[in-house]
Amino acid sequence: MDRTALTTINEAFKDPAWGTFVWLAMTAGARRGELCALRWDLLDLENAVVSIRTSIAQLDAVTWEKDTKKPPATADRPRPGHHDGAARVSRTL
């Protein structure tokens, strides 16, 4: 990560929930709508797995939840505080 990214992460982790979200946004490769649809019950910190199942869409002032654009897949992503380890990011329907 470059210095700007590290500064952003350090500032965000002053609030652990916000820091976790910012780290996930920077490393998971998720789309904006997928990040907006995340819920705590989809995040397994113990096993370093996040399930990205839906996305939030918007047209003018109306929002709704929908399926993701990407098909189910699994990708390795670095785990917070474990730079030499990896976390599975699981995209499931």
Image (cartoon, rainbow, N blue to C red):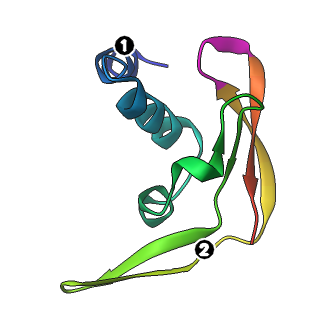
The numbered dot on residue 3 is 1
Along the viewing direction, whichever of 1 and 84 lies nearer the viewer: 84
> What residue is drawn where x is 67% and y is 70%?
70
Residue type marked 2: Thr
Give the left or right position of residue 15, taking residue 82 as reference. Answer: left
Give the left or right position of residue 4, taking residue 43 as reference. Answer: left
Q: Residue furthest left?
A: 61
> What residue is drawn where x is 51% and y is 71%?
55
Seen in the picture, residue 87 relative to 7 is either above or below; the reply is below
The numbered dot on residue 68 is 2
Residue type marked 1: Arg
Marks 2,1: beta carbons within 8 A: no
Q: Earlier in the sequence, mark 2 or mark 1?
A: 1
**What span is in magenta?**
79-84
Neighbour tally class for label 1: few under 14, some 14-19, many 20 plus, Cα within 10 Å = few
> What residue is drawn where x is 35% and y is 14%?
10
Location of the C terminus by quadrant is bottom right
Q: Quadrant of residue 44?
A: top right
Q: Is residue 44 magenta?
A: no
Instruction: State the separation of the CA atoms marked 2 and 1.
Output: 32 Å
Secondary structure of residue under mark 2 = loop
Where residue 33 appears, as percent x and y from the top left, is 44, 66
The numbered dot on residue 64 is none
Where residue 5 appears, as percent x and y from the top left, is 38, 23
Seen in the picture, residue 61 relative to 68 is either above or below; the reply is below
